[in-house]
Amino acid sequence: MATAAHTLTPEEASANPPSEAVVVRFAGDSGDGMQLTGGQFTLSTALTGNDLATFPDFPAEIRAPQGTLFGVSAFQINFGSISIETAGDQPDVLVAMNPAALKTNVDALKPGGLIIADAGEFGQRNLDKAKYTSNPLEDDSLGKWQLLKLDISALTVEAVKPFGLGNKEALRCKNMWTLGLALWMFDRDREPLIQWLKDKFAKKPELAEANIAALNAGHAYGETAELGAMGIAQRNVAAAPAEPGLYRTVTGADSIALGLVAGAQLASLPMFYGGYPITPASAILHALSRLKEFGVTTFQAEDEIAAIASALGASYAGSLGVTCSSGPGIALKGEAIGLAIMTELPLVIVNAQRGGPSTGLPTKTEQSDLYQAVYGRNGDAPVPVIATRSAADCFDCAIEAVRIATQYMTPVMLLTDGYLQNAAEPWKVPDMSSYTPFPVTHHTELPPEGEKFLPYARNEKLARPWVKPGTPGLLHRIGGIEKAVDTGNLDYSPKNHQAMTDIRRDKVLGIDVPDQVVGAGQAGGKLVVVGWGSTYGPITTAVRRARTKGLDVSHIHIRHIWPLPKNLGELLKSYDHILVPEMNTGQLKTVLRDQYLVNAVPLNKVSGQPFTIAEIEAAITRHLSSDAAEELGPDDTQLPSTEAVNP
Amino acid sequence: MNEITTIRPSTPKDWETDQEVRWCPGCGDYAILKAVQRTMPEIGGTPENTVFVSGIGCSSRFPYYMETYGFHTIHGRAPAVATGVKLANPELDVWIITGDGDALSIGGNHTMHLLRRNLNCQVLLFNNEIYGLTKGQYSPTSREGTRSPSTPFGSVDHPAKPCAFALGSGARFVARGIDVHKNLPSVLKAAHAHQGAAFVEIFQNCIVYNDEVFEPFTAKPNAQANQMWVAHGEPLLFAGGTKGLALDTETLTLKVVDVVDGDTSGVIVHNVKNRAIAHLLVEMPFGPFPMALGVIYDDPAPTFESAVVAQNQAASEGKKPDLQKLVAKGQTWMVDKQPHAI
């Protein structure tokens, strides 16, 4: 395809292996429908059988002023015939719908990569807004890339003419025209998309027809125009090898919602979800609010505190209480999490992390709430913490969170992040019969004659009985004041507080967390890269590449952040060097140092953007010889579409 | 032990716990506790289906002393916890115990939303116009000029009026009672009979930090002159029936009129479904006017939990919860070939 004319340097080849994988980025105005275009291209890619990963990157403003640099919305997809773990470091193809989209994204494009620009949008007004002094499509400034300039606007208006739309409405079909061209480039079937448009505009058939016409016109343009002469050939990316079975695409938000429902079903419990809208967690509330037939009650509360407090009230009444938020909301929930710890009720708290502190970067990703999850409450307040590594992994992690919460009578923190919430990937549809149910039976047994019911008596897991109000003969009171061992009566005595603090700690430390496995490589060796959460993709690929080059490096990815797997300490000590890449200033690193007294060395990035594979691969090479801590600044070549370019 | 839950009607004693009550001697809370324990048998309550939910403050210790299910939560959040309890199990009889600081300061937001949503529960707000448990700071209902450890020169902010707040939030039941008054159980009974959020402000004397603050209408010598117990269908009379409330039609405000020889013409007849009368009564300044007590407003509307349950049922109608189908939803594709190493 477009890169054929360009001879890759060995360095470039390692950063992005040719032919098996392609990275395409769609960028345009936030009103141009780029997320929708990307989403539909993703679906068509998945249906072709490619492995894929996506990265939607959009501004916090819903409709930023048209044509501005900060109003650019982008969607990147990496797909191929090989295993794909990240959205790709550098695009091979950039679709730029206006000058601002070009300006904010072109530096990321691989040398020799292809730019498809809508020349119709490169008028003086838009050039001014993008702060171009001359038209980049006409001067030589884009010389190191291939440029395909088309007046997509005019071509679209022409294509939809028969449907009698106004100019504004006609132009809104631009994204479908562009998508049609992209589908041609990668030899994709248009039929699923046509069907989707018919469903979407079922009530406005003329809009459906116009969009389909635009899609077909874009596709036909590829077929008929002499693009071959410009070195742009149609390209067929073969299906990626995958385990046989049924597949679909899933985003992290959907996957969490499905996993929570599955978890509640496996626990034989109705679910109560208390939520308050916050980016990027809201998608979970949206998904769950449509699943009432699974015994799900969703409640949009008046604030974050009411969201968790209502969920805890529902848990007290015998349901599985769930609440989701992002960092600022989790901060507000802190006191109620403490109450859940004190009253020892099950509760699942999902944190879709975003850039912080305070309001921070609402639509950007970060993993800087690990301290908050593990330590962020008053008092000695232990909470199990689980971190998801990929969109598909969110499903199993959510089930695990429900299992721990209900089996151990404890709140559980489930960490995901903005990147995982929005990113889509192929998912092998799980066989639900392969999951072992963990049904909850609420305690109803009366104490022996003459004895009192003990609400804080414990089983072998140190869990206390879960009694639903409405149960005869087991009346009791709970609350946030320190409880006496067994009876649960108020007790401030020194001995009792010591005993209860120890019990709460031991209960959480005793959770049956699976042993840590080594993802790539082996126990023992020169270097281990230790990660958690959504850095899984870049670390996996970087370690795989380094190992292909013969480097002695292994990968450990921690799902259970608290309590940590029992074998982790010994495992870490079996390597000479430990490198911990994190999208924060070194939070897991601190925990590992504290728990195991090992020299865990941080590799930190807090630009609101995921790590690139190249960044981690380079760090691996350096760390095989040096133990210096590193902080990576923002990378110019990477996903800067909406970085702070204020008007 | 199962025998206990059979037909024998309960007595107030059945609603007492073995816990030692830890309020200050002489606290109004004791009287309210007794009134509630007296009310429960009369409304046919069953301990196991009753839940007392409280926030933080002196009043919020209440659940520990009721032989029911109880949840002593965190400051201000009882309405939110109670909402979760009731939505998870609408069969439970939920009582929220709160105070002026708990319900109107730190928890004002939750109180407002509980009332506007109309969750079927009882909210008993013990108003003592002071922060007792933190040793006597002024509260959101303290009168202007209240001297307290945090306002040594007197408070300068205007107090909140709990019943006006409740009405303004959309409450469909608003009532007032006095901790030691014999009418309190009947007010509580009416609150319980109301389907929806029933808001009851109980004037509660804090003997340590705000003693006698309600004396102008609670003290025996003042009671007759200054208490006006309202009743549906009865004229708004006080001072032993010698005075009544009438509407000044020029200014649309209340005025006190003398009732001579039992002639109540012109005196407003109380109607618990009349929201305008309710607003006038709860806004009425004490001093020139008496303190309106009893059931001020009682006009039921559909409850929140019934709407939620109905919608959940309607949305589930005809849908079989098939988890396997759910996870396979959307556009899917089959991979047939065997995996090979990458």
Image: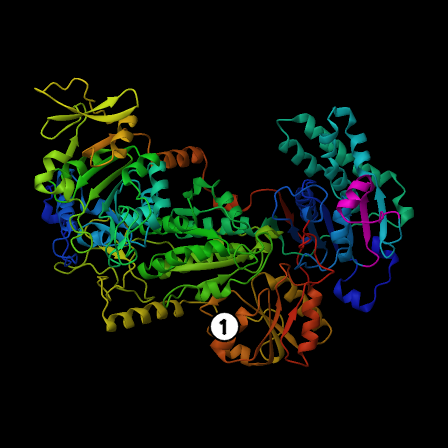
Question: Considering depth in this image, is A203 or A122 the residue closer to the camera?
Answer: A122
Q: Is residue A359 left or right of residue A442?
A: right
Question: Considering depth in this image, is B42 or A98 the residue closer to the camera?
Answer: A98
In the rendered structure, does residue A132 fall within the stretch colored magenta? yes
- Residue at image mark 1: A591
Q: Is the residue A225 above or below the residue A595 in the image?
A: above
Q: Residue furthest front?
A: B153
For the magenta stretch, what is the residue range? A111-138
In the rendered structure, does residue B329 fall within the stretch colored magenta? no
What coloring was used for the rendering? Answer: rainbow
Q: Quadrant of residue A110?
A: bottom right
Question: Considering depth in this image, is B111 or B197 the residue closer to the camera?
Answer: B111
Question: Could you say where residue B263 lies in the image, as x and y percent from the top left?
Answer: 11, 18
Residue at screen point 22% across, 46% down: B126
Q: Is residue B230 left or right of residue A539?
A: left
Q: Residues within 10 Å of mark 1 (few under 14, many from 20)?
A: some
Residue at screen point 29% across, 27% down: B275
The chain to which mark 1 is attached is A
Question: Could you say where residue A440 lies in the image, as x and y percent from the top left?
Answer: 35, 54
Question: Could you say where residue A192 lies in the image, as x and y percent from the top left?
Answer: 68, 38
Q: Is residue A243 left or right of residue B123?
A: right
Amino acid type at circle 1 is Val
For residue B72, say whether it is visible: yes
Q: Quadrant of residue A638?
A: bottom right
Q: Quadrant of residue A512?
A: bottom left
For residue A318, say whether it is visible: no
Q: Secondary structure at mark 1?
A: helix
